[in-house]
Image (cartoon, rainbow, N blue to C red):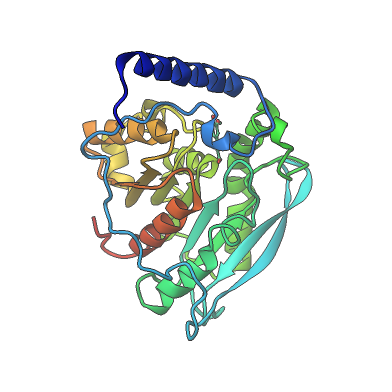
Amino acid sequence: MTLRAPAKAVLCLVLLACGVVASAQNSTTQANPEQARTHRAGPIVLAPDDVRAFPAAPAGFADVLPGVPQGRVEEFSYDSPVTGTRRKANVYLPAGYSAQRRYPVLYLLHGLAGTHEEWRGYVHAQAILDNLIAAGKAVPMIVVMPNGRALADDRPPPEDRKFAPEHLAGFAKFETELLATLIPAIDSKYPTLSDRKDRAIAGLSMGGGQALNFGLGHLDTFASIAGFSAAPNTKPAAELLPDPPRTRGQLQLLYLSCGNQDGLIGVSQTLHRYLKQHAIAHVWNVDEHGHDRESWTDNLYHFAQLIFRQPVPR
Ligand code: FER
């Protein structure tokens, strides 16, 4: 369609007005299921290296497939000194699980509106892991999916309180609970390998920020770390990695991903560029998705294949 100049001017004004209304709406707290996708989202400006590191996962990779041995998910609960309540986590045990063997452990953290159910329900983590393990593409592992909102009431809040400071603070408070309570409780109940190289942490969005903050802040506990579509709760790069040479020696795998339609991509791009500048090896996978499960299923598929292997492929 070609437009004459006056029509173009009118169109520009209309678009501009829509933009002004949209940003005014963003700055107020409104009940809008799209809010987690747009809150503090910026313009998407892509650089030449903001591309896929892997081809998309094959069809069916996140489906329950006939003939594939299934692991199981059980509920684990623990007393939290942080919240003063009993808290829940889902624990995935791979097919053929045996207390006579020892397993590495992946901690998977959910997003702002999620709970301990999000990874296995919405993102199909269980089927993805079953399929990879059955194909010999990932090592059998225990996967802990906690509720990362360390608040006495750890249910997702109503839409209009999602970005409330008390709610966001619950995600930061989870750091102490994870390190001081949950990990020791998991290591005492399950036959885990408890060396740092056998423990990974990953998360999506708000959980991606947590995984980067907690993981890079505790390299004595985690050697493999992933942030999928990390949210603005991610600490500034220089705070996360104040001593690049030291981090370089400790990291087994650092994995960052984001969709190129995701308004939060700036968070991941900034960290990626800092890592590049300081020569810290990492995976940078920018796919064609938005702030969506499509990106999270695909990146769990890739990340799960890279962890707990010696030597780590780069
Ligand atoms: C924000 C936008 C999105 C933010 C967090 C999110 C802390 C989290 C989204 C999600 O977890 O899906 O500005 O600030």
Location of the C terminus by quadrant is: bottom left
Image-based side of 228 in relation to 82, left or right? left
Q: Residue 85, position in %: x, y?
A: 78, 47
Between 242 and 106, the one nearer to me in the picture: 106
As drawn, 120 above or below 252: below
Image coordinates for residue 139, horizontal then vertical, percent: 40, 71
Nearer the observer, 233 or 21: 21
Q: Is residue 197 visible?
A: no
Q: Residue furthest bottom?
A: 67
Residue occupying the point 43% across, 71% down: 60
Rendered location of residue 127, percent (x, y): 51, 70
Tell me the residue at 54%/80% (across/down): 98
Ligand 1 placement by image quarter: top right
**Residue 237 visible in this rendered orientation of the protein:** yes
Q: Residue at x 60, y 64 (%)?
A: 91
Q: Quadrant of residue 270?
A: top left
Depth check: give the residue in front, 81 or 150: 150
Tell me where residue 253 appears, x and y as whole percent: 33, 51
